[in-house]
Image (tube, rainbow, N blue to C red):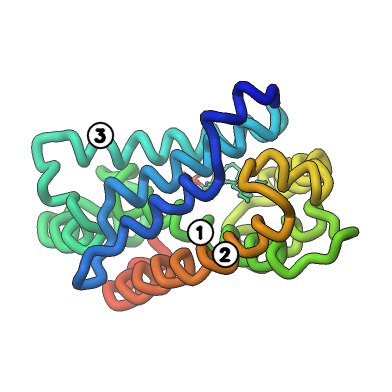
Amino acid sequence: PAASENQNFCFKDELDAFKLCLSPNKEVILEHYLAGWSGLVKFLNRLGNVFGFISKDASSKIQILRNFLNGESGSEYFTVQSMVKYELENKLVDLKKAGSHPESGCRTLLRLHRALRWLELFLERLRTSQEDGKTSAMCAESYNESLAQFHPWVVRKAAGLAFCMLPGRLAFFEVMNVGTPDQVVAMLGEALPVVTEVYQITQELYAKHDLLDIP
Ligand code: 1PX
């Protein structure tokens, strides 16, 4: 990306949204959660058009949730916790098979939540990588350990092809626009615990309500 374009983007700002998304009583504030995801999508778009099919899917899920947040029952969607309670109490979730609520907030957020586990694994690999580390391999390993199990063969295949187009470690760090490689590593060390906490809180909530496999 051109230097001028770089001024508008810094990966640290994007991850900071995830910091904001935990309320004092450890609930996940949807608006900030979605802002975090929007930032990641922005980053993905900077990596090039081959990732378009991934960013499109993420964007459409972000949009579905934003529509709930801005809709009539918006206040029920303030946190992920209130969303789950509201949608379950009002039978707005298809729990066993897709029916009259194929795009509930719960099922849509579950897709992003699963991808957050990929992000956690990937950022940890980036953080601990050596100078000659291959981002494509780090990305593929993280994917295979997490999201891949939820994707059909065609999606796994397309994702695998896209990963091969990732820039090398240094170029990747430059797109992040955080500073020197040491600064990137330090930033990742700070950001990761937040991502992990958001993931775990959501995971426990979904497990408690038996929502981890909704279609
Ligand atoms: C410093 C590194 C930061 C990198 C940030 C990159 C942000 C990536 C955002 C990825 C969001 C992916 C959301 C995928 C949600 C999903 O699983 N959707 C599938 C299921 O949805 P459905 O509605 O059908 O039940 C959907 O089928 C997915 C289709 C698109 C393919 C998804 C491939 C996901 C690969 C994730 C890795 C991204 C690679 C980025 C490279 C840096």
Viewer-nearest of labels 3 and 1?
Answer: 1
Examine the image and state in which quarter residue 45 appears: top right
Q: Are marks 3 and 1 in contact (CB under 8 Å)?
A: no
- Amino acid type at mark 2: Glu
* Image position, residue 19 (x, y; %): 38, 59
* Image position, residue 134 (x, y; %): 84, 56
Task: Specify whether 140 is left or right of 203.
Answer: right
Structural crowding at the residue carrying mark 2, measured as other residues with C-alpha within 10 Å and reported as few (<14), some (14–19) or many (≥20): many
Q: Nearer the viewer, residue 161 or 139?
A: 139
From mark 1 to mark 2, how far is it between C-alphas? 6 Å
Task: Specify whether 8 is left or right of 6.
Answer: left
From mark 3 to mark 1, how far is it between C-alphas? 21 Å
* Image position, residue 156 (x, y; %): 70, 50
Q: Residue furthest right?
A: 132
- Amino acid type at mark 3: Asn
Disc 1 element? helix
Judge whether residue 132 can be spotted in this image. yes
- Amino acid type at mark 1: Leu
Q: Which mark is residue 116?
A: 1
- Looking at the image, which residue is at 16% across and 60% down? 82
Examine the image and state in which quarter residue 209 appears: bottom left
Tell me which label, 3 or 1, sits earlier in the chain. 3
Q: Are marks 1 and 2 in contact (CB under 8 Å)?
A: yes
* Image position, residue 103 (x, y; %): 33, 42
- Looking at the image, which residue is at 37% across and 55% down? 97
Structural crowding at the residue carrying mark 3, measured as other residues with C-alpha within 10 Å and reported as few (<14), some (14–19) or many (≥20): some
Q: Nearer the viewer, residue 170 or 58?
A: 170
Q: Which mark is residue 120?
A: 2
Q: Which residue is mark 3?
A: 67
- Looking at the image, which residue is at 78% across and 53% down? 135
